[in-house]
Image (tube, coloured by chain):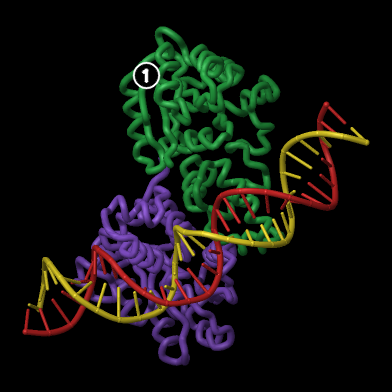
Chain colours: A green, B purple, C red, D yellow
DNA sequence: ACGGACCTCCCCCGCACGGGGGAGACGATC
DNA sequence: GATCGTCTCCCCCGTGCGGGGGAGGTCCGT
């Protein structure tokens, strides 16, 4: 069954963009839209989305407030993915304190947006690279930010290493040989990578690696 | 067992570059080097490489001559991959007539080089996009060049379509649904794509798609 | 009329892959 | 000392994947 998403943003254009990006995925379904945080609660109750993609700046009730409201008043609340235009650390931190599960810049690439939705839907938290580092530097792991072993999506060093080898086309057995560990170990790492990236298989993981710039062509 | 390669180029720098690129692959092994075509035959007899990466311009004996000589005098000859600096159609065509199995530009990206070696090692012929088209236009499928339905590695339109969907992370079943055909059909196309790209699985195919610029991040 | 590519679908088959568990060892942290 | 995360390895299990064949259809150029 697909991941259901509720879009909350005052700009129709942004909603349309998000919808286009997300609907292009077979496993993601946009079940509703709202133009302001004030309209969110009844919609969440009615639609029961897995994820709410929530804008920060909105006229009546901003995303931070709306996040708090949803988490406070709805039982079995959805995961909250905060969508913002600026790399505004203040907002990010506030949103995380309000209980958001991740945040995402509107300028993110489609694949990043998709992965973000998949990730939070699966119960993972995420912050994206640029802001994560500054956040960690400023607040010292203030929110749910991972200790950021690496920057990308909370991958551990070993997992990142495995992902790099995956992105070079190696099989589990080849990775095992390269790292001088057992194939079972590699499978564990691969599974962890898939989970953290919100990928269904190694191909999607490699795509994510390219799309996020974790590995670069050439 | 790995693919064994003999490098033949008068420039040490180029040899070093090729060696670095190829040795980075677990399934490829550089077993020897030669600085001129004149030294190739005894080396081929001694080392019995699967593939000879042969430069065109060399001081004593050029790559075309050397290719002819090897194929004429060695039994169970290796596959010949002609490496050239320029998109010189004349040389390409001559090399193919001499019996070379593929050619490759030095400016090609590492992944392309790797795939070229794998491809010819597996008995496939290959010509790379830019020159293929001009070749086909000029000689009317004079050599082993495919009719080049699309530009990339001789993929047909349908295969290219399938590759694009593969590069978006879709499974065979999802691709089948998207294209409104059976999964068996998709499997056929995928197999064709893998063969033509010299990829072992869909992950390597997607990597090739990114590395060759067939699909672009973002 | 004939070959040749291409697209479509079918069979069988083996295996790597990925999900779901669990578990021991180590170091850092508390 | 207890706890936590990481890395390591193990089990079972289902299935998607890819290789190996083949075959019928269309459309093309010759």
Residue B92 in view: yes
Q: Nearer the viewer, residue B96 or A160?
A: A160
**Does B92 appear above or below C22?**
below
Q: Identify the residue shown where x is 33% and y is 77%.
A: B96
Q: Which residue in the structure is indicated by mark 1? A: A34
Name the quarter where the N terminus of chain B is drawn: bottom right
Residue B63 in view: no
Which picture quadrant has residue B196?
bottom left
Q: Nearer the viewer, residue A215 or A119?
A: A119
Say left or right for B163 vs B156: right
Q: Identify the residue shown where x is 30% and y is 55%.
A: B161
Q: Identify the residue shown where x is 43% and y is 59%.
A: B205
Q: Position of residue B82 (x, y in %)?
A: 41, 72
Q: Identify the residue shown where x is 47% and y is 29%.
A: A51
**Does B137 appear above or below A113?**
below
Q: Position of residue B177 (x, y in %)?
A: 31, 52
Q: How many marks?
A: 1
* Letter of the chain that mark 1 sits on in the rendering: A
Q: Nearer the viewer, residue D2 or A150?
A: D2
């Amino acid at each position: 069954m697909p991941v259901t998403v509720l879009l909350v943003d005052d700009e129709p254009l942004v909603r349309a963009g998000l919808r286009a990006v997300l609907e292009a995925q077979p496993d993601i379904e946009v079940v509703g839209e709202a133009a302001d945080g004030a309209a969110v609660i009844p919609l969440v109750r009615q639609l029961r989305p897995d994820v709410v993609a929530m804008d920060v700046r909105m006229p009546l009730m901003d995303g931070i407030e709306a996040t708090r409201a949803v988490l406070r008043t709805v039982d079995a609340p959805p995961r909250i993915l905060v969508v913002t235009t600026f790399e505004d650390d203040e907002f990010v931190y506030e949103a995380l304190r309000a209980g958001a599960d991740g945040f995402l810049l509107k300028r993110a690439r489609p694949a990043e947006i998709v992965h973000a939705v998949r990730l939070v839907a699966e119960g993972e938290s995420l912050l994206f690279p640029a802001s994560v580092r500054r956040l960690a530097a400023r607040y010292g792991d203030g929110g749910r930010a991972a200790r950021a072993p690496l920057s990308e999506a909370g991958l551990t060093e070993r997992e990142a290493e495995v992902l790099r080898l995956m992105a070079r086309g190696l099989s589990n057995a080849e990775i095992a040989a390269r790292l001088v560990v057992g194939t079972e170990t590699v499978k564990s790492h691969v599974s962890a990578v898939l989970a953290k990236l919100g990928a269904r298989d190694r191909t999607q993981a490699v795509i994510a690696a390219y799309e996020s710039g974790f590995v670069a062509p050439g």
